[in-house]
Image (cartoon, rainbow, N blue to C red):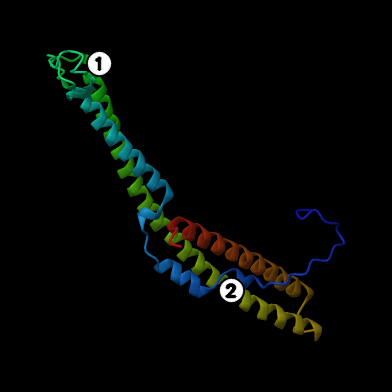
């Protein structure tokens, strides 16, 4: 039903489930360091904080002086004017405006930008702490999933041997039908727990690998 194929379709698994992961890869991943600068969300928050800081500087420059420089050249025909003119041909002007009085709106704008910058810094620091906590939690999840996988692998092996032994006893009449049914149910439960442990381990490995983003 999930694959949307006819019921009579034969499914052949060409890859063993153990190919989805390896103990070496899990151990390597658990040993990788967490570099917070590789985290995409943290990079975005850093850019936002830098932008908020820039906005503070820009708002503060509203109190700064304004300087303007102008140059003008006038062509003069000294022969036509009799060789004498009071106005120089080259003119350079420099204007300086100093805002000695400023409105409260401009001051409020600076305060607003400073508050936004402090909020951005607080968000960045909080995100950094949360990311380190998340890194530890994901490592714990992977470690726990790996230990559970080892336990379920051993349990599957033991249950399989019990089921095989009970089946042989049943053939020779030394085990009852109820014992065979119980051994079969235990085997099915062990297989289900093993599959679930594998899926949990693979998901935990993918989550930590994606979070670390060290590749």
Of badges 2 and 1, the one in the foreground is 1
Mark 2 vs 1, N-terminal side: 1
Q: Which residue is mark 2?
A: 153
Image: 167 above or below 36:
below
Q: Compute the Cα span from label 2 to label 1.
A: 70 Å
Q: Residue at x 66, y 81 (%)?
A: 161
Judged left or right of residue 26, residue 63 is: left
As drawn, is 82 to the left or to the right of 152?
Answer: left
Q: Nearer the viewer, residue 136 or 92?
A: 92
Q: Is residue 112 left or right of residue 13?
A: left
Few, some or many C-alpha atoms within 10 Å of disc 2 (few <14, some 14-19, many ≥20)? some
Considering every residue shown, the one lying at the far bottom of the view is 172
Q: Front-most of 65 and 205? A: 65
Determine crowd level at label 1: few under 14, some 14-19, many 20+ residues with C-alpha closer than 10 A: few
What residue is drawn where x is 30% and y is 31%? 116
> Which mark is on residue 162?
none
Q: For numbered disc 1, what is the local secondary structure?
A: helix
Q: Hey, which quadrant is residue 85 in on the image?
A: top left
| Relative image position of residue 54 (x, y in whole percent) | 28, 35
* Vertical order, 170 against 33 (above or below): below
The reply to whether discs 2 and 1 touch (Cβ–Cβ < 8 Å) is: no
Task: Report x, y in % for residue 143.
Answer: 45, 65
Work out whether residue 91 or residue 30 is closer to the camera in this orientation and state it: 91
Disc 2 secondary structure class: helix
Disc ID at residue 105: 1
Q: Is residue 143 above or below residue 51?
A: below
Reply above or below: 207 against 183.
Answer: above
Q: What residue do we see at 31% from left, 40% from top?
A: 50
Pinpoint residue 208: horizontal percent, then vertical percent: 47, 59
Number of numbered tags placed on the structure image: 2
Q: Within the image, what quadrant is residue 27 found in?
A: bottom left
Q: Quadrant of residue 3?
A: bottom right
């Amino acid at each position: 039903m999930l694959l949307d194929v006819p019921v009579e379709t034969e499914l052949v698994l060409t890859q063993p489930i153990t190919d989805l992961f390896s103990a070496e890869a899990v151990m390597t991943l658990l040993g990788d360091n967490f570099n917070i600068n590789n985290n995409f969300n943290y990079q975005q928050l850093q850019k936002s904080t830098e932008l908020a800081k820039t906005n503070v500087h820009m708002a503060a420059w509203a109190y700064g002086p304004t300087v303007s420089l102008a140059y003008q050249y006038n062509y003069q025909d000294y022969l036509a004017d009799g060789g004498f003119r009071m106005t120089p041909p080259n003119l350079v002007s420099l204007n300086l405006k100093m805002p000695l009085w400023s409105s409260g709106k401009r001051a409020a704008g600076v305060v607003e930008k400073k508050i936004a910058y402090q909020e951005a810094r607080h968000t960045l620091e909080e995100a950094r702490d949360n990311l380190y906590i998340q890194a530890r939690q994901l490592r714990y999840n992977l470690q726990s999933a790996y230990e559970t996988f080892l336990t379920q692998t051993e349990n599957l092996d033991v249950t399989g041997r019990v089921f095989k032994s009970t089946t042989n006893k049943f053939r020779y009449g030394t085990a009852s039908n109820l014992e065979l049914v119980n051994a079969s149910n235990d085997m099915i439960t062990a297989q289900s727990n093993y599959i679930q442990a594998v899926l949990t381990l693979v998901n935990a490995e993918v989550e930590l690998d994606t979070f670390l983003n060290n590749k």
